[in-house]
Amino acid sequence: MFRIDEIKNSLKKNLQLGNLVPQFLLLFVLFFIVYYFTSNAQTNMAARNISSGFGFLQTNSGFDVQFSLIDYDGSYSFGRAYLVGLLNTLLVSSFGIVFATILGFLVGVARLSNNFLLSKLSQLYVEILRNLPLILQIFFWYFVVLRNLPSTENSFIFLDFLIVNVQGAYFPKFIFTNFNAIFYGLVCALLTIFFAQYYSKKLIYERGKSLPIFKISILCLILFTTIFSLIGNTDLQLQQAELIQNFGIFNYVGGVKLVPEFLALLFALSLYTSTFIAENVRAGILSVGKGQKEASKSLGFNNSQSLKLIIIPQALRVIIPPTTNQYLNLLKNSSLAAGIGYPDLASVFAGTALSQTGKAIEIIFIVMLTYLSISLIISAFLNWYNHKIAFIEK
């Protein structure tokens, strides 16, 4: 009996060792590949007298960028140029995700509408936009739509607030004195909204009633910001864009300017991605059992209440995973901005900065690591939210 146990233990050890050998072989192959390409790159760079390292980030860039959220010109460093491109990428990606989500949700719900015309128009919207190449849609918005807007002196002016011409769109710039008071008001409003939502959910489970959260949220935002603004003596000034003429050339100065490259990229990314999100929303709603919808109606819920309180909370577990992929695709698709000259991370750093410095390995490594980090952050947040709303089976 003792001999049999020894044989069994020996077999288990041999099996474990047999499982470890392929893993060590795989690690050895991976390390060898990395070592080979690294040593090969170092040899070739030494033969061409090309230095390596990240010291170039501190040197002057020597080139300008047409659109930047922070102060920048050619006298700033390549590190500053990287930051400019990163912020521009985050700007268009953030607005694109928000607009694509809102539009995709509305179109996805409209596709399941009982209204025949609305349903077919939504289907037509999805089938056309998702089957056209994204770069073609970017070119359409930039060259066909925005570049054919009127000249600066013949601008479209809407309600003395929005100015649109071939150079972009102009909005008034809001200049606050003592903005801290408004910030504190927003914090208090958000805390109040959070507790109102918590109480509303508790009220639903206990009494079957709900609070008008949207109206309460709007009221809190207006009320708290107004009160704190009055307490802090906050003053608001609007800096309008003004039309000036230099050497016979008209141009608007002041306010907030959105360049046509940003607008074209934002429109194309939002509309294109919204079609895929719409299909995710439609699939999520269809995944909810018909009995759930009938039960909500038997409880007296109208279509809006049934959608908001019964269907969508259950559909989110199906909607979120594929929608996460679309958010990541939108972020990566923003690199197509180089096609129309929008100064995003890929265009500014992996394009202009690379050609100026010749630091291909370092710059490509930084850009790849940046996109990977942002993608992992988005994925981690949405995975956390998906886990939070997942059904807990007992």
Image (cartoon, rainbow, N blue to C red):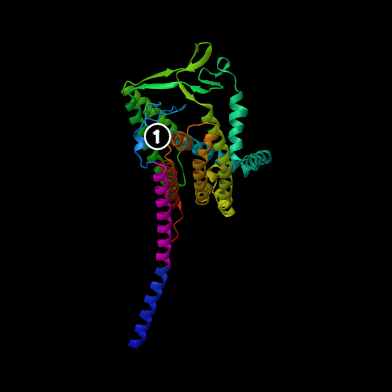
Asked whether 390 falls inside the magenta stretch, the response is: no
Mark 1 Cα shell of 10 Å, populated few (<14), some (14-19), many (≥20): many
> Element type at marker 1?
helix
Q: Nearer the viewer, residue 266 or 186?
A: 266
Kind of residue at badge 1: Leu
Q: Which residue is depicted at the point 43% across and 67% down?
A: 22
Give left or right: position of 164 versus 90. Answer: right
Position in image of residue 302 (x %, y %)? 56, 43
Q: Which residue is mark 1?
A: 83
Residue 334, percent from left and from top = 51, 38
* Nearest to the observer: residue 306 or residue 90: 90
By secondary structure, the bulk of the magenta-drawn segment is best described as helix
Report if residue 302 is visible in the image.
no
- Give the quadrant of the N terminus: bottom left
Instruction: Please tell me which residue is depicted at 58% across the width and 30% down the height of the picture.
Output: 142
| Residue extending furthest toward the left | 232
